[in-house]
Amino acid sequence: MLHAAGLFSVGVGVSDFIFEQPNDWRLLENNFEVITPENCMKPRAVQPAEGDFRFDHCDAFVAFAEEHNLRVVGHCLVWADSDKTPDWWMTENGQPTSKETLLRRMGTHIEMVAGRYGDRISEWDVVNEALSDNSEEYLRNTVWARVAGEEYIVRAFECAREAAPNALLVYNDYNVDADGKRANLIRLVKFLKEQDAPIDAVGLQGHYELDSIPYDGLELMLKAMRRLQVKVIVSELDIDVIPRSRWWADGNKYRDELRTLNPYQDECPPEILRRQADQYAKLFELFCRYDDVVERVSFWNLHDGQSWLNYFPWKRVNHPLLFDRKGFPKPAYHSVVKVLRESTLAPHSPIRDLSADAN
């Protein structure tokens, strides 16, 4: 059992159709407290055309969570990527939208979506992925940044607080434990706090690769957020056992080679599983040392068979999570439970290892 009372909550990103997948419910209920829908609350899904709000799927997801005593993370109100934002938000009379119109549309969307659920959703990823991947830049070069600069982020948090006054409000991004992007995250959080924007937490996605986890950078990020007095959410944790960084290296010249790479389609070797377990343990040791900062740790997908890393950035059989394709605990599961149980930071928080009930 992964519940870590007194340390931080443990969650998982799940299929939008979890309410139609009863075979997964026992594994979910026995190990997780919080669920995040993969796609159904994103702007393109909720409001594909102006004023055309589609809530049926979101409503079913939230109702399922309530029936199973699970809290919900709303993901996400604003995705700060032009490619992930509905086209109609970005244009006005055939031209790029004005700042006034962009912020008005954003405010209406947040009011309608976050306001609909109120206290039924405990956390919102308010803005997703606004920072540039280029260490020489600050904000991602999108219509959002070009039209409204940092102002849209401030306003998004203000609108979210108005619509969901009791929710934990999160800025979510990836690679913010890397040097350049971490500096930009610190800059953004400082700016938001100077503007009195109601940011409560920063989400670190945590899509790691075996043998390449930036423990030192992660600790620096945790220390920085502690100084800034914001919580940290590890929002989408996994450890890829088929490292993918070369996919983008040297002008993408390795892609033809990698498309055929599928080394663990029959099974994952015990040595790989052991290294993965050790590296998950080291991550959770770090999370436990900073349990005053870490608010939640969520894995991204329920078990190996459902992981997005079976398809991204190329199709292969991957093994990045704590449970195998049959829902049985892997060595990584046992290593995480051991760390939680033995954490000296929370001796008052007994962690039960219910391996027999894990699935």
Image: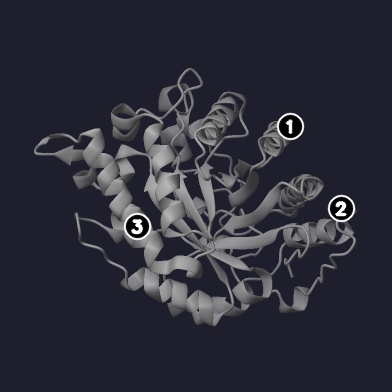
Residue 240 visible to an observer of this rendering: no
What is the quadrant of residue 296 in the picture? bottom right
Quadrant location of the C terminus? bottom right
Amino acid under label 1? Answer: Asp
Report how far apart the C-alphas of labels 2 and 3 lie in the structure: 39 Å
Question: In front here: 273 or 138?
Answer: 138
Number of labels in the image equals 3
Residue at 45%, 39% (x, y): give it.
129
First reached walking from the N terminus: tag 3 or tag 1:
3
Q: Position of residue 325 (x, y in %)?
A: 59, 67
Residue 250: percent from the left, percent from the top?
Answer: 47, 22
Res 56 seen here? yes
Closest to the observer, 186 or 214? 186
In this view of the protein, which residue sits in the foreground, 77 or 252?
77
Q: Which residue is mark 1?
A: 216
Residue named by callout 2: 345
Callout 2, which amino acid?
Leu
Task: Say which residue appears at 76% left-offset and 78% top-offset.
Answer: 356
Pointer 2 or 3: first along the chain: 3
Which residue is label 3 attached to? 111
Residue that lies at the very extreme toward the left in this rendered image: 93
121 or 30: nearer the eye? 121
Residue 268, percent across and down? 65, 55
Task: Pick whichever of labels 2 and 1 is earlier in the sequence.
Answer: 1
* Residue at horizontal 38 percent and vertical 33 percent from the top: 151
Instruction: Find out whether the residues at labels 2 and 1 contact each other: C-beta distance under 8 Å.
Output: no
Callout 3, which amino acid?
A: Glu
Q: Please tell me how crowded label 3 is: few (under 14), some (14-19), or many (20+) other residues with Cα within 10 Å.
A: some
Location of residue 82 (image quadrant) = top left
